Image (cartoon, helix red, strand yellow):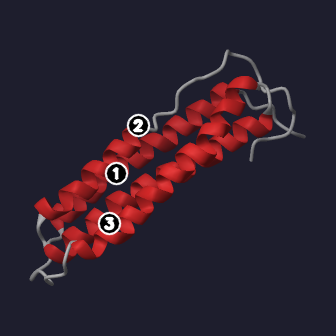
Amino acid sequence: MAVRVTKEQTLRTMRVIWFAFIMSVVLYIYVCKMIRPSSPSGAETTLFVVPAVLDLLSFLWIRFKRYAPALQSLQSQPEDVRAVAKWRVFLVALLAMAEAEILFGVVSWMLNGIFRQSLPFFVLGSLLLLSLWPRQFWSSSPIADDRPLG
């Protein structure tokens, strides 16, 4: 038997996921502060710039080519379970990519032991995460389809 899932339940779930991603940033910083490398490896931070830029370009491509149309579809067809699911999938993908930017900073910090060099990764990833707060774009009603979103 399929359980009817409301858009509000999906939105609450996405907000919990978003909050978990934000809390992981705090935990990353805490762990990095507690576990310092005994001797910095001297690895160049520029080593992490290329994959970080590629991750950022992928983030922007998904944001504008995939997430924006999914969001527009959700706004035009708020009762469509597929539109809600599509929005959810691309939002999680974007959250993961923003988190990857932060992880480049964590790896850089752990290898170099210098927070200043890792700070741009943390700032960029955090700004991307903060920009992805799940907003309500529809009126309150259950999703028309009886199929679960999962």
User: Residue 53: which quarter of the image?
Assistant: bottom left
**Observer able to see residue 96:** no
Name the residue at 11% across, 60% down: 116
Front-most of residues 123 and 53: 53
Q: Which amino acid does label 1 sit on?
A: Gly
Mark 1 to mark 2: distance in Å? 10 Å
The disc label shown at residue 125, or none: 1
x then y, percent, for residue 113: 13, 71
x then y, percent, for residue 127: 33, 43
- Asked whether the beta carbons under mark 3 and mark 2 sit within 8 Å of each other, the answer is no
Q: Which amino acid does label 2 sit on?
A: Ser
Q: Mark 2 points at which residue?
A: 131
Q: Which numbered disc, 1 or 2, marks the residue that appears first in the sequence?
A: 1
Mark 3 to mark 2: distance in Å? 19 Å
Q: What residue type is labelled 3?
A: Phe
Q: Is mark 3 on a helix, strand or loop?
A: helix
Q: Name the residue under label 3.
A: 104
Name the residue at 57% across, 31% down: 12
Judge from the rendering whether residue 104 lies leftward or rightward of residue 38; answer left or right: right
Front-most of residues 69 and 128: 69
Around disc 1, counting alpha carbons within 10 Å, would you say few (fewer than 14), some (14 to 19), or many (20 or more)? many
Mark 1 to mark 3: distance in Å? 9 Å
- Asked whether the beta carbons under mark 1 and mark 3 sit within 8 Å of each other, the answer is yes
x then y, percent, for residue 145: 86, 32
Judge from the rendering whether residue 112 lies leftward or rightward of residue 7; answer left or right: left
Name the residue at 71% across, 36% down: 84
Question: Where does the N terminus fall, quadrant-wise?
Answer: top right
**Observer able to see residue 85:** yes
Around disc 3, counting alpha carbons within 10 Å, would you say few (fewer than 14), some (14 to 19), or many (20 or more)? many
Q: With respect to residue 111, does 88 lie above or below? A: above
